[in-house]
Amino acid sequence: MSDSAASNVPAHYPVPGWVPLSYGADGAPDGTDGRPARRLDRREFVKGWLLIVLLLAGATVVNGLTALADNRHAAPWEPWVWEATSSVMLVLLAWLPGVATVAAQSGHPKGGASFWGRLLAIHAGAVLVFSAVHVVGMLALRQGLYAAAGAAYRTGPFADRFVYEFRKDLLTYAIFAALFWVARRSRAHRGAPTSAETFDIRDGARLIRTSVADIVAARSAGNYVEFVLAGGRRPLMRTTLAAVQAELERSGFVRTHRSWLVNPARLTGLRRQGSGDWTVELGEATAPVSRRYPDALVQLKRQG
């Protein structure tokens, strides 16, 4: 990607608005200096968060039944309050390990002393905040629910409770961070196509079998799709762009416009066109990037 293109990549990537975004030391959004962006992509976040919700739902049921059997002196509703309040706070805090995971992996070459020092520092700070907010929120919810039931919830000294909960929160945080890491890795592996992948283009009576890596872009042309191939050839195939997208999206191709699908591995630059629109440079070819496809720039930068 050219320097001018890199400096123009927008800061406002589509992630949940309440998730904190971190910036580089110079105040510019991460990713504009060629380093990986220090933020969660929306799909990475949703995938990791859903895994966490499913895990917590199962843990709440199992732990609730166990607590019910182990605490026969308690009212039947109490173990469910204990487990549900903890799970609710963990769901609300689930974004923190995800953001910390992205931040810890960005900005420094992997494997060096500075990388591991940064990783440990970020996660150590994040897990302390994670556990403290979890404990405070959980106890506040329990006290409120007990009061509503006409009972009193006794917490004991906060320091003792925090130490007791922190041991469990440390493991929970590590599991959450690992789930976000898996979600991030699974998306990263949908990268540029390999030369071994092929795609068949039926141009009239001819069948052109080409490497997916040699497909620069594809655009809608009426009842046809025009393929832009490396070397300048532009065969036509009677099909829809949606059908082609369904085949090539698994190889990392990105829909940038209602009429265009591009190969991020061929990206050589980005130019701002105004009003939120961009032009993607693909060697000698160019394609539009519409503001109606806000995820396109994120994917182009990630995979290109």
Image (spheres, grey):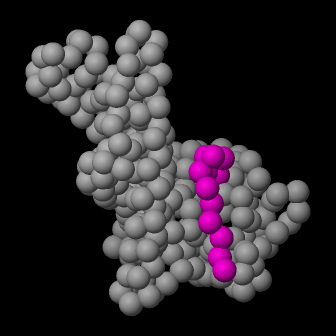
Magenta stretch encompasses residue 20? yes
What residue is at 45 percent from the left and 16 percent from the top? 147
Image: 269 above or below 128: below
Which quadrant, please, contains the C terminus?
bottom right
| Secondary structure that dominates the magenta span | loop
Q: Is residue 159 visible?
A: yes
**Which residue range is magenta in the image?**
14-25
Q: Position of residue 10 (x, y in %)?
A: 74, 65
Q: Residue at x 73, y 75 (%)?
A: 27
Residue 89 colored magenta?
no
Residue at 37% over, 58% down: 177
Q: Quadrant of residue 281?
A: bottom right
Left-right relation of 20 to 11: left
How many numbered discs sit on the rendered protein?
0
In the image, 203 versus 301, the foreground residue is 301
Q: Residue 129 at x, y = what percent?
A: 47, 56
Q: Nearer the viewer, residue 227 or 96?
A: 96
Where in the figure is residue 81, as x and y percent of width and height? 33, 22
Residue 99 in picture, x, y percent from top left: 50, 59
* Above or below 214: residue 2: below
